[in-house]
Structure formats: structure tokens, C-alpha cells
Image (cartoon, grey):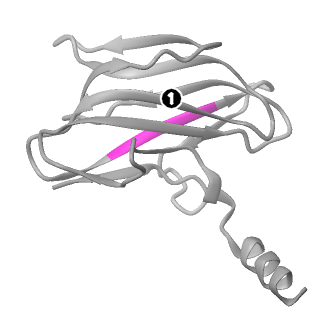
Amino acid sequence: MFKSLILTAVLAALPVGAAHATVKTEAGLTSSVLGKSETYRLNVPTEKEISTTEVRLVIPAGVTVIRFQTMPGFTRTITKNSAGLVTEVVWKGRIAPMEFARFLFSASNPEVAATVVWKVYQKYSDGSVVAWDDSDPEQAPASKITIK
């Protein structure tokens, strides 16, 4: 019983944004190597009692997206810049309450040491959007990958 009280206290102390949308390497790391081709995973949990219906990922400058893994039940739209590089990806589909989705994609890292910031915008069925973009670093932090 004492152990479950401690566990409950620890879980209650976690920040609200602890389960937020995150980008990490496929191995779950928050760092990678200069110029390396890497598989990244965007993990998106539904944190409300309503479904997530859209996920928008802004690709950081210096990162070159190569390809995407198929995600059944979702449509994917990409935006490219004048050089033909992917700058944004939008997945539309449904992630029910108490579920999460993992979107995998391959990309080449920048050739210079940097911290890349992944901005994610999660839209819910009521039209509300949670911006995981550091606009509120305490409640909605953006994911960061250190390239070294």
C-alpha cells in the first residue's frame, strides 16, 4: 500500500504536458549525428475525452525529409518550399481518447551541430488546437533533437 501511495504521489506531480506530442529518433533518443539519415517517430497521444482529428508537423530548417511510413486510417498532405523540400506535413484521421498514434518518417539531419525544434499542432474533433511549439514551454513544449 505504501508503494502505491508513493506511485500516486509521483504521478500526480508530473507536469500536465508530460504526455505531449513528441518527436524522437526511432530508438527513442533526443540526439542524433550530423548529416545522418535517421528514422524519426512522432508520437501523438489524445489527452482529451474527444478524438484527435489532425496532426500538423512543421519540419525544422536543415532537416530533409526523405520518405514516410504508411499510416492506415490517415491521409497525409505535404507542403514543399521552392527548392522542393518538405516544410510541413499534415495527417488527417482519428486518434480516439485514451489512444495514441505513432507516425514514422525518414530524414537527413543537418550537416552542422544544432538543436532542431519540432513544432506539432494537434487538432481535436471540437476544432480546438493544442500547439506543441514552445509558445507555452511549461504546458506545451516543442520537442527538440540535438544534432552533434
Q: Quadrant of the C terminus?
A: bottom left
Q: Residue at x 48, y 37 (%)?
A: 42
Q: In the image, what residue type sits under mark 1?
A: Phe
- Left or right: 26 with respect to 140? left
In percent of the image, x 74 and y 71: which residue is there? 11
Which residue was labeled with disc 1?
Answer: 103
On-image quarter of the N terminus:
bottom right
Depth check: give the residue in front, 103 or 51: 103
Q: Position of residue 26 (x, y in %)?
A: 39, 41
In the figure, is residue 107 to the left or right of 71?
Answer: left
Looking at the picture, how far across and down is residue 80, in whole percent? 30, 13
Q: Position of residue 45 (x, y in %)?
A: 66, 41
**Is 134 displayed left or right of 2 in the figure?**
left
Q: Nearer the viewer, residue 61 or 28?
A: 28
Q: Is residue 135 magenta?
A: no
Q: Is residue 127 above or below residue 117?
A: above
Q: Is residue 115 above or below residue 111?
A: below
Instruction: Name the main secondary structure of what is drawn in magenta.
Output: strand
Residue 120 on the magenta span? yes
Which segment did they paint magenta?
Answer: 117-122
Q: Secondary structure at mark 1?
A: strand
Count of numbered circles in the view: 1
Q: Is residue 146 above or below residue 133?
A: below
Task: Spot the residue most to the left.
Answer: 111
Q: Residues within 10 Å of mark 1 (few under 14, many from 20)?
A: some
**Residue 119: x %, y % from top left:** 44, 39
**Which residue in the rendered view is the most extreme toward the right?**
1
> Residue 118's quadrant in the figure?
top left
